[in-house]
Amino acid sequence: MNMPESSIKDKELLHTERLHKYALYLSVFTVLYNFLEGVVSVLVGSFSGSVALVGFGLDSFVESLSGGVMIWRFTSGAKLTPAEEEGIESKAARLVAYTFFILSAYVLFVSLKKLFLGERPEPNLFGIIIAVISLVVMPFLFYLKFKIGKSLGSRSLVADSKQTLACMYLSLALLAGLGLNYLYGLWWADPAAGLVIVVMLVREGYETLEEERLCGY
């Protein structure tokens, strides 16, 4: 016996609303985690004189901005008309893309400044621990955001998941920079890795805007 069409639609709506709630919860977690990570990183980096760790902490605040955009995006839940859904999705996707550019500009400035001025991040074991924790948390957060974003057809959440992935790469760069400096005194490793990250961030930002432009037709 076939299920009535109304029951199918109700189940689909319930599933969509559940995914919206998960997306909202992930976004709230993103903001809280990155804010805490940012505060700890900036305080520890300032106390130890580690420019790399301070920069990583400021990056975490930018990540909180992206998460805040997602909270705004999913606060309305699933009870929107298709036109309203598309309108808020388009705005959210653009805002997430702009956070890529904000982050890339900052990382580029700090990386070049450190390279040209020869600013050496201080050996910092606590900073290495922060980077390791981030490398454990961010892959799971990226996977969940990406999966839910694809299920909802949310371009903005998929873009935000890439922002989380970028944070993972930045954590890896921080770990490499602080680790190589801590073990071998190779101070230039951190800003060099930062320049590679800049290219990736700009590419992701342009791809997000380009996808939004194509979907807008």
Image (cartoon, rainbow, N blue to C red):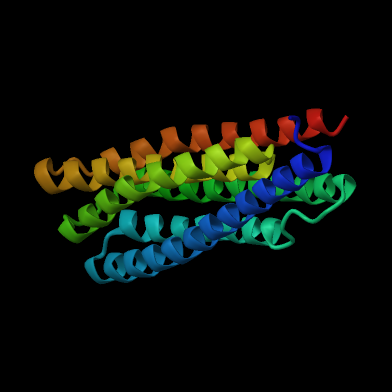
124 sits to left or right of 63: left
Number of residue marks? 0
Q: Which quarter of the rendering shows the C terminus?
A: top right
Quadrant location, the N terminus: top right
Q: Is 151 on the left-hand or right-hand side of 211?
A: left
In the displayed structure, 20 sits above or below 201; it is: below
What residue lies at 51% left-to-right and 32% top-to-bottom? 199
> Residue 213: x and y, percent?
80, 32
Q: In the image as oriented, which residue stretches furthest toward the front?
A: 1
Residue 181 can be seen in this image: yes
- Between residues 125 and 214, which one lies in front from this camera angle? 214
Spot occupied by residue 141 in the image (x, y as percentages of width and height)? 44, 47
Question: Which residue does the image show at 69% across and 37% down from the upper left?
Answer: 153
* Residue 155 found in image quarter: top right
The front one of 194 and 147 is 147
The image position of residue 38, as x and y in percent, is 40, 64
- x and y percentages locating residue 208 in the rendered image: 67, 35
- Can residue 62 be seen from the camera position used here? no
